[in-house]
Amino acid sequence: SKNGVFIQKNNGTEFSAANSAYAGMILGYTVIGLDATPATFDVTNAMLPVHDDLKVSFTFPPSGKVEIMASIYIQSDAARDVTFGLSTTNASTGFTSLGAKYENTTYYGDETDGEQHSHRWYVTGTAGDTEELWFSAGTTQAGRIDLFWGGDSSSVADTSHPMEYQPFVMKATALPSATYTG
């Protein structure tokens, strides 16, 4: 391609822009906490972006449809639910909801529980528009849920923190035009 634009054709019919040639392509990827001191966030009873760095940036594919996935470690010390959401502004600015449909109860700890947890959202936009979304969290009662990510040594040898967590991951993946939404 002389101009950097590639198209796909089948018997003379272009299908890359209108159909699914981009489906499955990772459009944006963020990993935070590799070889770093473990970080934590105390979830409050308000939706808040967790950290300025916990975000994903991408450009909408021709279908205008994207799956956003985020993965982080959750620790609870009482029976509480956790809501994950998407913000169009960072933690320093404060929470600006992408919309209520992007704020979902995603985890319920029934006692002292902890696990690596992933959540997904289906987001639509205009092909070619850029987007930057921050991972956000809230709960019904502050002080009962913590989020953790990162680590820089073995959890056995690390004397500064008792656990070694997986890094935070957030990614945007292109979806096909023919996405059934029921």
Image (spheres, rainbow, N blue to C red):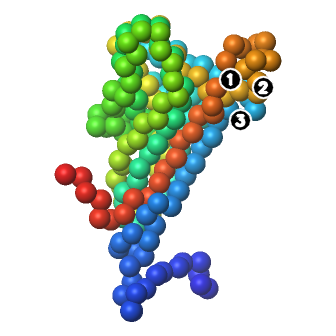
Q: From mark 3 to mark 1, how far is it between C-alphas?
A: 11 Å
Question: Residue at point 40% right, 29% down?
Answer: 84
Image depth: mark 2 or mark 3 in front: 2
Disc 2 element: loop
Q: Residues within 10 Å of mark 3 (few under 14, many from 20)?
A: some
Image depth: mark 3 or mark 1 in front: 1
Mark with earlier residue (2, 3): 3
Left or right of 115 on screen, residue 111? left
Q: Position of residue 174 (x, y in %)?
A: 44, 58
Q: Residues within 10 Å of mark 1 (few under 14, many from 20)?
A: many
Disc ID at residue 164:
1
Question: Residue at point 63% right, 40% down?
Answer: 31
Left or right of 100 on screen, residue 62? right
Mark with earlier residue (3, 1): 3
Question: Residue at point 57% right, 39% down?
Answer: 169
The residue identified by callout 2 is 153
The residue identified by callout 3 is 34
* Residue nearest the observer in this picture, 107 or 16: 107
Q: Type of residue at label 2?
A: Ser
54 up-or-down from 164: above or below: below
Q: Which residue is at the far left?
A: 182
